[in-house]
């Protein structure tokens, strides 16, 4: 924890994290309702993926507001791109004609989708920006 930022920033960040977690249940309820109306089974998968990515973006703010810096290419190409491709594969395989690997869904369950989305959001911000 950096003392120069002050404790107020971390308190505000923690309140924002609590609000993000609290309102996620209403977001998932809304997506479940849309799934029953539209008969689309991929709405919940899309909701889980979107929530994990946004939570990763918010987690990157823990070290402070990003400021413009030189791009961190190893972090972008070696961490973000593989995580992003593994994370986006289930939705991409439903909308784009690519090879659908059945074993992929047995290996990567719901919590791994969350982890890869979290890592994608976190490393995206960290690779383009640095904390103040």
Image: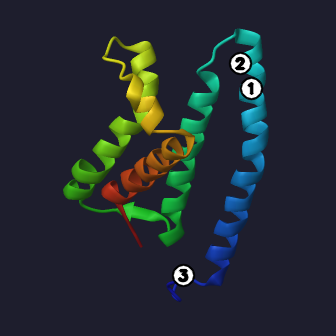
Q: Nearer the viewer, residue 52 or 14?
A: 52
Separation of marks 2 and 1 at Cα, in angstroms: 5 Å
Label 3: which secondary element: loop
Which residue corresponds to the image point at 53% horizontal and 46% vertical from the top-left?
A: 114
Q: Nearer the viewer, residue 52 or 130?
A: 52
The crowding category of the residue bearing disc 1, from other C-alpha atoms within 10 Å (few below 14, some 14 to 19, many at least 20), is some
Q: Which residue has dot 2 on it?
A: 35
Label 1: which secondary element: helix
Mark 2 touches mark 1? (CB < 8 Å): yes
The quarter of the displayed image where residue 103 is located: top left
Q: Which residue has dot 3 on it?
A: 5
In this figure, which colouring scheme has been used for the structure?
rainbow
Label 2: which secondary element: helix
| Residue 34 placement (x, y as % from top left) | 73, 19
**Residue 110, above or below 95:** below
| Residue 53 placement (x, y as % from top left) | 51, 44
**Residue 41, above or below 56:** above
Is 81 positioned to the left or the right of 124 in the image? left
Is 47 positioned to the left or the right of 30 in the image? left
| Residue 49 placement (x, y as % from top left) | 54, 37
Is 83 positioned to the left or the right of 8 in the image? left
Closer to the observer: label 3 or label 1?
1
Separation of marks 2 and 3 at Cα, in angstroms: 43 Å
Is 107 positioned to the left or the right of 85 in the image? right
Q: Which residue has dot 1 on it?
A: 32
Which residue corresponds to the image point at 36% horizontal and 37% vertical from the top-left?
A: 86
The crowding category of the residue bearing disc 2, from other C-alpha atoms within 10 Å (few below 14, some 14 to 19, many at least 20), is some
């Amino acid at each position: 924890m950096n003392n120069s930022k002050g404790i107020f920033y971390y308190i505000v960040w923690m309140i924002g994290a609590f609000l993000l977690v609290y309102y996620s249940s209403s977001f998932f309820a809304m997506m479940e309702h849309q799934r029953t109306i539209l008969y689309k089974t991929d709405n919940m998968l899309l909701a889980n993926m979107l929530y994990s990515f946004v939570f990763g973006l918010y987690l990157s703010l823990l070290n402070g507001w990003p400021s413009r810096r030189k791009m961190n290419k190893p972090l972008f190409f070696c961490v973000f791109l593989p995580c992003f491709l593994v994370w986006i594969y289930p939705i991409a395989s439903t909308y784009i004609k690519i090879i659908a690997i059945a074993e992929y869904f047995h290996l990567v369950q719901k919590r791994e989708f969350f982890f890869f989305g979290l890592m994608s959001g976190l490393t995206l911000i960290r690779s383009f920006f640095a904390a103040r």
